[in-house]
Image (cartoon, rainbow, N blue to C red):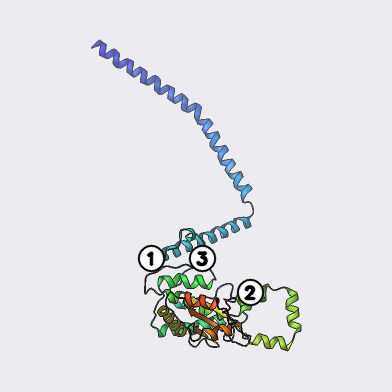
Amino acid sequence: MDEIFNILSSTARIDKSRRKKKAKQRELTAPQAQRTNITSSEDAAEDFKNTITPKEDLSNSTKNHSAAKQKQIHHEEIAAFRNRVGIYLNQSNKHDLTIPDPIASFGEMANPPWWKEEGSSKNSTFQLLASAFIRNIERGRWINPTPIQMQGIPSLLARRDVLGCAPTGSGKSGAFIIPTLFLSSVSEDIFYNRIRNGDANQKEDQSKKGKKNNKKKKLKGSNGVAESSSQNKIRALFLAPSRELASQLHREVERLGEGKMHGLRAALLSKTNAATICSNSTSSSSAGLDVLVTTPLRLVECLKDDTDKKLDLGSV
């Protein structure tokens, strides 16, 4: 019993001495910790003062943050929409913020930033063309755009290069016919942004030419659309792998372009009209074409023609 009592008492003394040492250590470290906390809080306050002192800077940073946040939210919503409807971008384009947003309806086809015209937006060339095309789309019983059309139409209207893959019957033809009809209808001055980016001397020379110059401008339309097509030029070229698909594509072009401003000039290149189309492409008196549809072999034959009636595609 004595041995057990001695063991217990010695253990109690050891525990008591340990508690005293820990208490002393706490007393020594507490003031140092307080000084460290005070110093760090003072430094943080000083850094905050040095970083944002005026109220204007605080408001500007808030605005910039909110704008960046809104842009990020919008990008995430568009990415979620693409995943939901089955639009898949190339790996290199997934995080490209310059890619136009997809449209959810044909009525959302918007005037691209480069298409600059004077006058009200309601009576603009783009809106008048869009009204005619949407009317033809509804006649064909197209209710909503397909995924390839949702992303392809705004991307081509933005004059971007597009490579699209979609199953048969998914509306690939409409995805490039509709924007092409817009692009082939706009005047070259607007398409190439000549009016706004031309030098001042050229503008002065044009203003001095007077009525003659004004008459020439009227040939392209007073509201930014080329009457029919640019003179003796082919504005767009569609290639189909077979004669049957080319004929189908040509019919779809005429259906969607029916009733557009100043009419539609489209042709299907064949043996019977090859000589006429080739000669018109080099003739200054020809009205030109908005859209030319053909097969690769027929096109090569016209381009390699040894006669003077060689097809000119310099304006496509």
Q: Earlier in the sequence, mark 2 or mark 1?
A: 1
Q: State whether residue 138 appears in this view.
A: yes
Q: Nearer the viewer, mark 2 or mark 1?
A: 2
Q: Disc 2 and disc 1: Cα gap in Å?
A: 37 Å
The amino acid sitting under disc 2 is: Asn
Q: Residue at x 66, y 75 (%)?
A: 194
Label 2 residue SS: loop
- Residue that badge 2 annotates: 193
**Residue 257: image x %, image y %?**
48, 84
Q: Is residue 308 left or right of residue 255?
A: right
Quarter of the picture containing the N terminus is: top left
Q: Residue at x 51, y 75 (%)?
A: 300
When asked about the image quadrant of residue 22, the answer is top left
Q: Amino acid at mark 3?
A: Ile
Q: Secondary structure at mark 3?
A: loop
Q: Nearer the viewer, residue 146 or 41?
A: 146
Identify the disc placed on residue 99. Answer: 3
Q: Identify the residue under disc 1.
A: 84
